Image: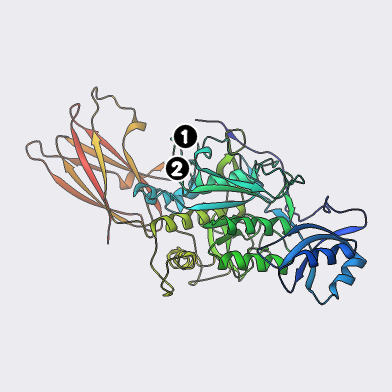
Amino acid sequence: MKKVTTFTLLLTLALVFAGSSLCRAGEKSYIVGFKQPPGQTEKDLVHGHGGKVKRQFKIIKAMAVSLTEQAMVELQSDPKVEYVEEDIPMALIEPEVGGFEYENSWGVSRIGAFLAHEYGNLGAGVKVAVLDTGIDYYHPELSANYGGGDNFISLDPDYHDPYDDSYNSHGTHVAGIIGAAIDGDGVVGVAPQAELYAVKVLGGDGFGNASSLIAGLEWSTENSMDIANISIGSGTYSLALEEACQTAYNAGVLLVAAAGNNAGGDVLYPARYDSVIAVGGTAHDDSVYWGSAIGPEIELAAPGLMVNSTVRAGEYGLLSGTSQAAPHVTGVAALLMAAGVDDLNGDGFFDHLDVRLNLQETALDLGKSRWDPVFGYGLVQASADAPQAPIYIEVAVGEKNDENPEDYPSILLDKGTFDLQIANDSLTGMAIEIVKNGQYLENKAEYIQFDKKDPQKVILTIDARGTSFEVVFIPAGKPRSFATVEVTVSL
């Protein structure tokens, strides 16, 4: 197994931002909203006030510009101008850093994604934009799923490489939670066959501006992304950013954002906007992650404590925070889009609006009521709409009857009641062991002695409601003897 890198930097959450390097002396960065889509007349207006146009948007009627404060005041009074606001700084939601694929991906297991995988839903064909610090697209867990992207931080207009150069591999870590491959090593993502697109809107230091995020949303809309994961935020409201989020959402892009790591403080923007799913974090025992923001905007909760995922140079690392919670929700949304959901809002279409409703309706309620400001509608669930087709497991004695215990077949059962129908062919017996969080549960173990003369069928029911069990099957008998276990979800 590849080396797991543990970050050792002690970081604090602080939204301290440097000024834009694109501005000349005495100037600041602003976003100017116009009453009509800006063209040459609006460019000339900015230039006439001594300003510089840095970026012209199509997703909203606005431009990112640099101006002196005096020019900004003058421009505000022009009848062509709707608003002028500061190009607010954005930053990655600063993570807390800490010390076999599904075992290494506790969040993926906790939300039941493994069950969707076993039923064949891997999120194939769903396009996910990761609006972040970029992605290490050479990572063996991510390279096959990487679909491209763009760079909105580079000062060179001809440079579009969205490679992750961040100090903590933030974008790569987020991408791995969404879509790390099933390859028998390292970690696995919630939707391991989703298409990942790196939309670099933050620099290697983890900082950017609203204008770069707006540009990333514009790219996501123009390139028909299904979902945009935004594990970044700011405590400052931006009208331009709100308009861009709403336009992208109206165009069919499902927006999922980290609520913020401010230990019970207000939800950050853009997660705070109505058009965005705000995601809080949970710990291994389903309690709230201590650093998670809370508030009326929280819509869903997902695992956020000590999450193992991909980092640069083909390695792995542990990070904690709502930045890690949000991609769990993004991955589940990708599974739902791949599987299809009902027209829940009755508008005659299956789209991202129905996916959002499905996420709400199938979440595991963790609070005191159906919705609360800590967990929202509850812990996101990946297996809620998994097809009910059975899973078949062959349990056989090897040629030399000397199997390594690690080679015994097993299955993960999560948050439900499951029937195990055992059709014996030639085994003399079978031990069934139950493991929870790596601990063997002796009081739940079973041993079945089969009749030597007649094949038998034995039915067992395992209650895993509200929890997760690994069930291990240990055969007894002569070499090449076997039985078949059919696993179904109890109705």
Residue toward you, 81 or 139: 81
Residue toward you, 187 or 134: 134
Residue at the extreme left of the image, as rendered: 453
Q: Is residue 195 above or below residue 260?
A: above
Amino acid carrying label 2: it is Tyr
Q: Count of labels shown?
A: 2
Q: Is the C terminus in the top left, top right, bottom left or bottom right quadrant?
A: bottom left
Q: Circle 1 — which element? A: loop
Residue toward you, 238 or 176: 238
Q: Residue at x 76, y 56 (%)?
A: 15
The first of marks 1 and 2 along the sequence is 2
State which quadrant residue 317 falls in: top right
Amino acid carrying label 1: it is Asp
Measured from the top left, where is residue 149 in percent x and y? 60, 47
Residue under circle 1?
Answer: 185
Q: Residue at x 42, y 48 (%)?
A: 122
Q: Residue at x 89, y 71 (%)?
A: 73
Measured from the top left, where is residue 126 in percent x and y? 47, 53
Q: Is residue 160 left or right of residue 2?
A: right
Residue 266 seen from this side = no
Residue under circle 2?
Answer: 102
Q: Residues within 10 Å of mark 1 (few under 14, many from 20)?
A: some
Q: CA distance from mark 1 to mark 2?
A: 9 Å
Residue toward you, 425 or 185: 185
